[in-house]
Image (spheres, rainbow, N blue to C red):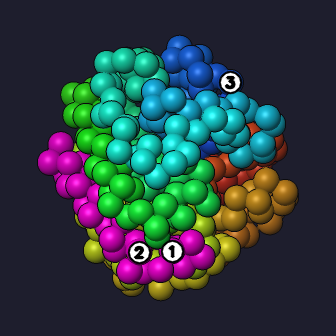
Amino acid sequence: MDKRERLERAINGETLDRVPVALWRHFPGDDQRAADFAAAVIAWQKTYDWDFVKITPASSFCITDYGVQDRWVGALEGTREYIRRAVERSIDWTTLKALEPARGALARQIQTLDILKSEFGEAVPYIQTIFSPLAQAKNIAGEDRLIRHLRTDPERVHTGLRTITESTLRFMDAIRKIGISGIFYAIQHATYSKLSEDEYRAFGVPYDKQILGAAQAHGWWFNMLHLHGDVPMFDLIADYPVQAVNWHDQETPPDLAVGKSKISGAVCGGLGRWDVHNGTPLEIREQARNAISLTNGRRFILSTGCVAMVTTPTSNLRAVREVVDTTRI
């Protein structure tokens, strides 16, 4: 069974040879240069032979050309610290201009995808991270400033979100012919710890629908939704048109079985990212088998709820990859 067939069967709840598995991580420093980033992703895949590759650029790749600046200061997640924002006053949302994907950081990401296409071809499914417009807005302005502005100057924020959405759609159109399998759509504000449900319906849902509608229109067969953070608004996004949903299931409700009952595709998770980082191979294999048992190995992809740490031990990563080969479903 090849990787695509295994994933498609998992999404549809059909009989499998084994549960699909994949982890993903940042490659700080290397993610600032197309050739180095592609080489790091290729080496990661060659080492562990995941069932798909989730391409994880720095969150700034889609907003650098608005004028933000960031740097890596050693975070274990491989994420970068923002040192300059493009929006300080609410009026600044109205001055953002839609970005051209043929230029700047977006063009660099397209170069990365071109290299990966040459390496993976049809043999390895690979999906491009797309941050939701609201998540991009958070990095453009900063979390506190964004939330303050959307509550005090909502129309200005909507103007900015429309611009960000247009930039994102242009980028997606530019990568349509490269051969990616889909997108990993990262949502960071569909959580009750940040916004109310009414606020997310107003500032998140309309733009999410545009992005995911475009992904459907492009014919991508493997689009995954990522719900970042605790107390996610799972019911609100349960009907989003994606093939899989990933969230921090080991840290926050719902669990995998409940989550699977709410969606039509596959759930992706079962492992705590810090458990994979700090635990032993034996503990990781036990957690993985518990997740497979909870889901009956159907409509399930084994992974963590977010990125693997850049310092996760090799033996732990190997345990994640190998456990699916020895666990019957």
Query: How far apart are the alpha carbons under marks 3 and 2?
Result: 36 Å
Judge depth for marks 3 and 2 and give the one in front: 2
Say which element carries label 3. Answer: loop
Q: Is 94 drawn above or below residue 152 in the view shown?
A: above
Which of the 4 image quarters holds residue 62?
Answer: top left
Q: Quadrant of residue 303?
A: bottom right
The count of marks equals 3
Query: Which SS does the magenta portion mostly show?
Result: helix
Residue situated in front as seen by the camera: 95 or 85: 95
Residue indicated by mark 1: 195
Contact flag, marks 2 and 1 (Cβ < 8 Å): yes
* CA–CA distance in space, label 2 to label 1: 6 Å
Residue depicted at 52% across the width and 22% down the height = 38
Residue 138 located left or right of residue 163: right
Query: In the figure, is residue 92 to the left or right of 75?
Result: left
Q: Picture coordinates of residue 65 (x, y %)?
A: 45, 27
Q: Which residue is mark 3?
A: 29
Q: Residue 278: image x %, image y %?
A: 84, 57
- The answer to whether residue 18 is above or below residue 266 is above
First in residue order: circle 3 vs circle 2 = 3
**Considering depth in this image, is 190 or 13 the residue closer to the camera?**
190
Residue type pointed to by label 1: Leu
Q: Nearer the viewer, residue 18 or 76?
A: 76
| Crowding near the residue tagged with mark 3, few <14, some 14–19, many ≥20 C-alpha atoms within 10 Å | some
Q: Is residue 52 visible?
A: no
| Residue occupied by mark 2 | 199
- Element carrying mark 2: helix
The residue shown at (43%, 19%) is 104
Magenta segment? 190-218
Residue 192 colored in magenta in the image:
yes
User: Which quadrant of the view contains residue 26?
Assistant: top right
The amino acid at mark 2 is Glu
